Image (spheres, rainbow, N blue to C red):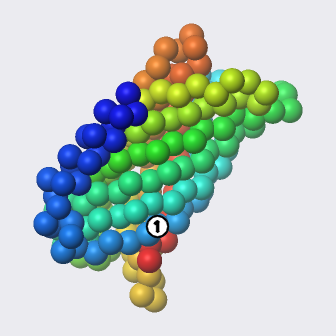
Amino acid sequence: MIRRLLAVATLATLSLGPAAARAQTAVSITGGLSAPVSTLGDATDLGYHVGAGLNFGTSNLPVGLRFEGGYDGFGIKGFSGDVRIISGTANAVFNIGTARDAPYLIGGLGAYNRKVTNGEGRTALGVNAGGGLRFPLSGLTTFFEARYHVMLGDDSSGLNYQFIPITFGIMF
């Protein structure tokens, strides 16, 4: 499954190759709060997340790419333990307008590994979608973003976790 995801990401990158090669490439560092939803929300409290990404494209292009890795942590309600989710995603960024501070939509596929304290790690494919707003500050591009992440797995095996990271990021 992960090989298929990498193949899709590679094909997407190659199909945008000339445009992506001419476009700006930026590294992003992100962090913020993660809100657990559904079954995960029943079992855990509000959490946190951190991440890093490689971005291809500028707001002048209609579509860009972002490859990123993330770590989300949630405390278990009523117990001393936590749930952590490590993700790797490949996303398309759809710019709404060409201004440097224009909003955008983002969505893509990923691999998500969740682990409950002292438990076995489990991996599933997943999807995410959301939106954000960029705003330039002193030569850096910063952004706020919210996305809905869904692990595509069987709920009975604990792989159908859903969460919404609310992110502040810096691109440089």
Residue visible at 25% across and 67% down? 57
Q: Is residue 159 above or below residue 49?
A: above
Q: Which residue appears farthest toward the bottom when viewing the image?
A: 138
Asked if residue 43 can be seen in this view, the reply is no
Label 1: which residue?
Answer: 28
Q: Label 1: state its secondary structure.
A: strand
Residue visible at 44% across and 77% down? 172
Mark 1 residue type: Ser
Total numbered badges shown on the rendered structure? 1
Q: Is residue 32 above or below residue 161?
A: below
Q: Is residue 119 above or below residue 24?
A: above
Image x and y of residue 45, in percent: 71, 36
Q: 163 or 156, which lies in front?
A: 156
Q: Which residue appears farthest toward the right when viewing the image?
A: 80
Choose top left, top right, bottom left or bottom right for residue 107: top left
Asked if residue 2 can be seen in this view, the reply is yes
Residue visible at 66% across and 31% down? 115
Image x and y of residue 65, in percent: 29, 57
Image x and y of residue 34, in percent: 59, 45
Dot 1 surroundings within 10 Å: few (below 14), some, or many (20 or more)?
many
The N terminus - image quarter? top left
Left or right of 109? Residue 165 is right
